[in-house]
Amino acid sequence: MAMPRLQTVLLDPAGRGQATVLEVMEGVCRVYCPCEETEGMTLAFLQSGDRLRTDRLCSDGACVEALTALKFRRDGVGEDERGMDAVNEWTLQLLRVRHLGQAEQRLHALLALLVNRLGFRCSDAFQLPFRLTHDRFGELIGATRVTTTRLLSKWRQAELLDMSGGELVMRFS
């Protein structure tokens, strides 16, 4: 199955009794909870090779948002996949980020997590192959969009961050 960048699909919770997995073949996606109470809370970011167990979703299901062009396939759950999965690990890591004291610490930890898990080295910086909005950064670190914009602007002025240009990338020193 293929999805273009920025398309979102809702994984139907009706099939909860079946233990199936969506495996990301190419690209990067964001998995989030569609529940009204959580306002689209991000659960994980998945990339090639990561697997999402559909039988572990909440009663409202989950949404998959393609941050880059995305290809994935449905598969059965293997015997070796009974424990922790990629979504559980991401959720734990994002929870750790949100428990840091100051917004700047949380944003720095989030960027480090994203770069370490999804980024790659290019010349004198690290690069993410997708962009996130200031609103999304705020949601991920538990801060307002205004706070996130202020911090990102500060880092841009210090030339620690480059989100400009027509490319769909974010570069970090």
Image (cartoon, helix red, strand yellow):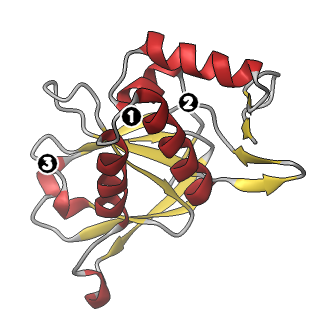
Residue 73: x and y in percent read 46, 64
Identity of the residue drawn at 76% across and 42% down: 173
Mark 3, residue position: 58
Residue beneath the point at 39% across and 30% down: 102
Task: Name the residue that disc number 2 marks.
Answer: 132
Callout 3: few (<14), some (14-19), or many (20+) C-alpha neighbours within 10 Å? few
The answer to whether residue 10 shows anywhere in this view is: no
Residue 147 image offset from top left, x and y in percent: 46, 15
Rendered position, 117 above or below 139? below
Q: Amino acid type of disc 3?
A: Cys
Residue assigned mark 1: 140
The residue nearer to you, when weighing 131 against 68, is: 131
* Among the two numbered marks 1 and 2 on one chain, the one whose residue lies closer to the N terminus: 2
Going from N to C along the chain, the mark reached first, 3 or 2, is 3
Task: Determine if residue 5 is in view.
Answer: yes
Mark 1 → mark 3, Cα distance in angstroms: 19 Å
User: Looking at the image, which residue sits at the far front?
Assistant: 101
Compared across the picture, whether 172 is left or right of 99 comes to right
Q: CA distance from mark 1 to mark 2?
A: 10 Å
Relative to residue 102, is residue 143 depicted above or below? above
In the rendered view, does 142 fall on the left or right side of 28? left
Few, some or many residues within 10 Å of mark 1 (<14, 14–19, 20+) = some
- The x, y position of residue 36, in whole percent, is 16, 24
Q: Amino acid at mark 2?
A: Leu
Tell me if 68 is positioned left or right of 161 in this view: left
In the picture as drawn, the residue positioned furthest to the right comes out as 123
What is the secondary structure assignment of the residue under circle 1? Answer: helix
1 vs 2, front mark: 1
